[in-house]
Image (cartoon, rainbow, N blue to C red):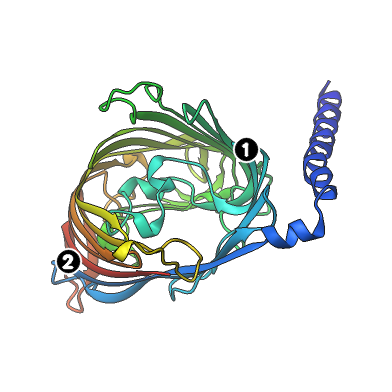
Amino acid sequence: MLNFLKITIIYSLVIFQFFILYFFIIPCKAIDIKDFEEEFIVYPGGILQFDYRSISNSARADSRFDIRRARLNIEGKISSRLNYKLECELQGNETRKLTDAFGNYYFFPRHRVQFGQFKVPFSYEWSINDKDFPFAERSIGFSMQPNRDIGLMFAGDVFNNFFSYYLGSFNGDGVDGSSRGNQKDDPELALRCIIKPFSFTKIPLLNNFFSGISITEGRIDLNNILLNVKSTGMIGTKRNLYTLNANTKFGALLDVNKKKRMCFESGAIFGPVTLFFEYKRLKYIDLKPVRGDLSNANFYSWYAAILINIIDEYYNQNNTRQTNINGKQLNSYSLCQIALRREHFSGDSNWIISNSFNSTKEAEAYSIALNWAWYPVYRFLIDYTYTDISNPLRIRINPDGSIEYMKSETSFTCRFQINF
């Protein structure tokens, strides 16, 4: 019975590959070379973020200037059905430079297959581009969710965005160049679905309401157990709110079964006001320590945010049409936006090493941010974030043997951003 099931799966995969080749090769045969040359378009671009971050705790040497992101990208289309994007990260802390390298093939106008390395579909927060994100950093729970990975995904929407879906299969190891274990693991499956139940109505307070759910699951090996939960002020440092890896308080782990994630998202847009909320869960299943029985590790986080556009204007000077180097329309632009966020994180206390002071059970954070853009390519951001933690974290051991601890964090970030 087992062999029959394996044979069935293999034949199904072969048929699926022929199905993909059919949609790729047959339309290409009908493309005239002149049409191909006319449709071939390349858009160069990038983003540069220059930060100064101040940490109020005098015992921490984390106040610093920083180049938060320095990215170059090339995107465009080869035909009316096929487009692509390549992006690399030049920032110094990044060891794996390739961020995005993928193509999209539209087999129907609103349905596509995406292949390569790209963002794993998970959460509304992750769908917002870095250049447009209203806070200095993403939420604490972002550390629990998937990042970019290599895989294949089907995506689309029906009934004019009434229902959108993203369904993909990924390696589960992260971006290209990430370490991989020698144990058997399975691809990670990811699903994100969003529904706008009132999109067909003309009710101003309801037609932009959305709700969605994201799920990922995959069998993993010990190399995939690496959880470093960070607050805003810990980004770019070795400090963490919570740490879980293959070395636990019971000793080294011997085995692990699966990793599951879930995210519920909801939000709405009311004119200049945007509200959104997310609840995320992460679960490691059947962790096997050297000493002790099989056990799970559970984590959850939530946040609620509100964005208010005080000024949001687009206009052409002298009613003339201008274009930038990307061939896009260049308008005079003015944006002033205030953003507020409240978030919570809860870690599994069973996996906190006693008296190590390297993980906290819970954390609460409050953020307020002001965004100001006076031109499409320039943006200035000020972010204030206060994080309160339930268990003290060790900062350092002094030469006299005394230990300094951290019980809260106050982070102030100023950012100048250039988009091109």
Q: Answer whether labels 1 and 2 touch (C-beta < 8 Å).
A: no
Observer-nearest of 111 and 357? 111
Compared to residue 208, the image places residue 307 above or below, namely below
Q: Which mark is residue 109?
A: 1
Which amino acid is tagged 2?
Answer: Glu
Q: Return the x and y of residue 367 as percentages of the image width and height.
A: 19, 51
Give the Cα distance between marks 1 and 2.
59 Å
**Residue 356 appears in the picture as rendered:** no
**Location of residue 335 (image quadrant):** bottom left
Secondary structure under tag 1 reads loop
Badge 1 density bin: few <14, some 14–19, many ≥20, Cα 10 Å: few
* Rendered residue at 35%/39% (across/down): 350
**Left or right: 240, with 196 as reference point:** left
Q: Quadrant of the C terminus?
A: bottom left
Observer-nearest of 216 and 298? 216
**Residue 30 appears in the picture as rendered:** yes
Secondary structure under tag 2 reads strand
Q: Which mark is residue 404?
A: 2
